[in-house]
């Protein structure tokens, strides 16, 4: 499933830094808990915005989106499974959930951990995801695909060197 012409939900859109890349030609709704960030996204991109805390559920109708984006969001949530379930609820059959999470088990994080330091220096990250945990989170979806990206040495060992895990998953038809 690809655009343009898709109805896209962007969870945790903030001011629209990621949103701007797929807003043209698609009907985008941005959701965030920060009202000021939503105002800026709306003014800057002309998208519809909805204030909501994704951990409390989404005030949106069932099966109303072709795609849901969760870019760099799930690691900040106490219960990411609930948000993934809500994304599945608002996706149309055959719709795609796409997103990314930090690769908390990359080589640099392992070295930091072995040295007695936190493997992830962001105190707002409540979850650490490896591929197995990410696949388990996406249970109930079909055609789950994971890819490691971002980093100078990714080409040598994606799992150990990639800073980000990108995922796509399809809601069963």
Image (cartoon, helix red, strand yellow):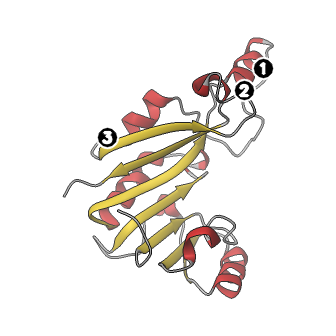
Q: Which quarter of the rendering shows the N terminus?
A: bottom left
Spot occupied by residue 51 in the image (x, y as percentages of width and height): 56, 76
Residue 75 drawn above or below residue 152: below
Spot occupied by residue 107 in the image (x, y as percentages of width and height): 69, 20
Helix, strand or loop at label 2? It is: loop
Most foreground residue, 170 or 57 = 170
Q: Which quarter of the rendering shows the C terminus?
A: bottom left
Q: Which residue is mark 3?
A: 139
- In the image, what residue occupies the spot 41% across and 79% down? 5
Spot occupied by residue 108 in the image (x, y as percentages of width and height): 75, 23
- In the image, what residue occupies the spot 57% across and 35% down? 148
Helix, strand or loop at label 3? It is: loop
Q: Which residue is mark 2?
A: 119
Report which quarter residue 41 is drawn in: bottom right
- In the image, what residue occupies the spot 69% across and 87% down? 43
Most foreground residue, 89 or 28 = 28
Q: Which residue is mark 1?
A: 112
Most foreground residue, 67 or 53 = 67
């Amino acid at each position: 499933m690809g655009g343009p012409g898709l109805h896209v939900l962007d969870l945790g859109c903030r001011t629209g830094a990621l949103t701007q890349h797929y807003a043209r030609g698609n009907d985008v709704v941005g959701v965030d808990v920060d009202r000021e960030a939503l105002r800026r996204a709306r003014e800057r991109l002309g998208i519809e915005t909805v204030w909501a805390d994704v951990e409390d559920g989404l005030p949106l109708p069932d099966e109303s989106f072709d795609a849901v984006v969760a870019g760099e969001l799930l690691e900040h949530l106490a219960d990411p499974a609930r948000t993934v379930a809500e994304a599945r609820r608002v996706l149309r059959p055959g719709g795609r959930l796409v997103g990314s999470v930090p690769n908390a088990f990359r080589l640099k994080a392992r070295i930091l951990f072995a040295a007695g330091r936190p493997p992830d220096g962001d105190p707002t990250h409540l979850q650490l995801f490896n591929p197995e945990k990410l696949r388990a989170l996406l249970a109930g979806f079909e055609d789950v695909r994971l890819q490691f990206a971002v980093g100078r040495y990714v080409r040598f060992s994606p799992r150990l060197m990639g800073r980000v895990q990108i995922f796509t998953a399809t809601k069963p038809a």
